[in-house]
Amino acid sequence: MLLENTCVWRPQSLAELRARLKQSSTGTIQFLAGGTDLVPALKRQGRVPELLVALSQIRELAGVKMSPTKDRLLIGPLTKLAQLSREPLIQQHFAVLGQVAGLVASPQIRNQATVGGNIMVDNRCKYYNQSEVDRHSHGGCFKAGGAVCHLIPNATRTSAPVCRARFVSDLAPVLILAHCELVIEGPQGERRIALKDLYHNEGLYGARLNAGEILTRLEIPLPLVGKIRYEKLRIRQAIDFPSLGVALSVRDEGGSEVLDVCLTGVDTRPVSLTFRPSQFATRDDFWQNVAQVSKKSVVPLKQDFFPPQYKREMIAVLLKRLWEGN
Ligand SMILES: Cc1cc2nc3c(=O)[nH]c(=O)nc-3n(C[C@H](O)[C@H](O)[C@H](O)COP(=O)(O)OP(=O)(O)OC[C@H]3O[C@@H](n4cnc5c(N)ncnc54)[C@H](O)[C@@H]3O)c2cc1C
Ligand code: SF4
């Protein structure tokens, strides 16, 4: 019933997929990877694409390898999160990525969910990620095709952003600090963008590719520029999305430490910040500055158990723990 007006197609190779993407008559396309985010979304939305392309048979899109020049890690977007945690090349060159993959959801979901799906995961909101019955009880909001925001009642279609559904990928902040680049293919050919440029300050669509475009590879330049670490705030140690995720990379700049930070779970997109401790006379001054800047840089709303102000305060707490706990 759900997909009665949708053509579901399972190409066997990238070449087969490329040939079809070049046709102009494909209609609206959506790519299905592990389906852990998309399938529930299709059920909720009632808006289905004309063509649903199931990627699972395209072997070229899965797995991790080294570039021929040995200076880049190449990650297939169809690589499962569970596989990422076990992958020897990841353990050797980017161990924190495997560890963070192990913090996502539950073992069952990690066996199904993919890296590409994780960085493209839809923004979430307590009013949107609900059953049809629940949504019907208070009426559809902007993200569900309605004309109101239940979280910010005075928001309008011209607000920027229209919707404040939050970005929740655990992998994205760590990949952004590793200067991850995406290879994207579509009707116009191949293009590359930095992962940090994939995201928009808009909860309606946190990450969006152009029509018919597919992510075919993630590339990580090696060696990593700084030492990257990650801490996740959540109620339970399984299943829960990050109420706040803090990724930290510490690098050297002319003999002084620089802290590059990327946050998830507290805004419509990953939020990047940089701190230079050497610019402050004392550690106390530095941490006061970190707390002030962090609080001003994000707009968490009441979306889960933790109050927004608590999440703001926890940014500096988790950062301190990451930096001083090494
Ligand atoms: C109960 C539950 C708990 C969760 N907890 C967490 C958590 O703690 N942390 C976290 O980060 N995430 C969490 N998630 C989200 C989960 O990680 C993502 O759902 C998962 O990684 C998505 O991967 P997927 O392969 O299932 O993507 P899909 O659901 O198949 O796709 C997701 C989106 O990505 C697009 N997409 C996928 N691959 C490509 C590609 N190659 N090119 C173009 N577009 C593509 C799809 O079109 C779709 O829009 C949770 C999900 C559930 C259901
Ligand atoms: S923030 Fe977005 S998803 Fe949440 S109620 Fe408002 S419009 Fe809907």
Image: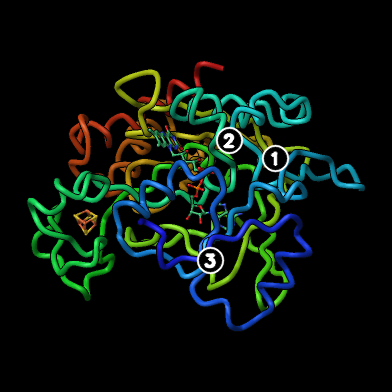
Residue placed most toward the observer, 95 or 62: 62
For disc 1, the neighbor class at 10 Å (few under 14, some 14 to 19, many from 20) is some
In-front residue for pair 314/69: 69
Residue at the spot 40% in from the left edge and 33% down from the top edge: 286
Q: Label 3 crowding class (10 Å Cα cut-off): few <14, some 14-19, many 20+? A: some
Q: Nearer the viewer, residue 129 or 56?
A: 56
Which residue carries the number 3 mark? 209
Q: Earlier in the sequence, mark 3 or mark 1?
A: 3
User: Which of the 4 image quadrants contains residue 195?
Assistant: bottom right
Give, as a three-letter code, the residue at label 1: Val
In three-dimensional space, the C-alpha distance between marks 2 and 3, rounded to whole angstroms, equals 27 Å
Q: Secondary structure at mark 3?
A: loop
Q: Amino acid at mark 3?
A: Leu
Vertical order, 110 against 254 (above or below) = above
Numbered mark located on residue 225 in the image: 1
In the foreground, 251 or 13: 13
Location of residue 158 by image quarter: bottom left
Q: Position of residue 116 (x, y in %)?
A: 58, 48
Q: CB under 8 Å between callouts 2 and 1?
A: yes
Horizontal side of 42 relative to 174 (left or right) equals left
Which residue was labeled with disc 2?
Answer: 249
Q: Can you give x and y, in whole percent of width and height, for residue 200 in the image? A: 42, 62
Q: Residue 278: x percent and y percent?
A: 52, 36
SS of the residue at dot 1? loop
Q: Earlier in the sequence, mark 2 or mark 1?
A: 1
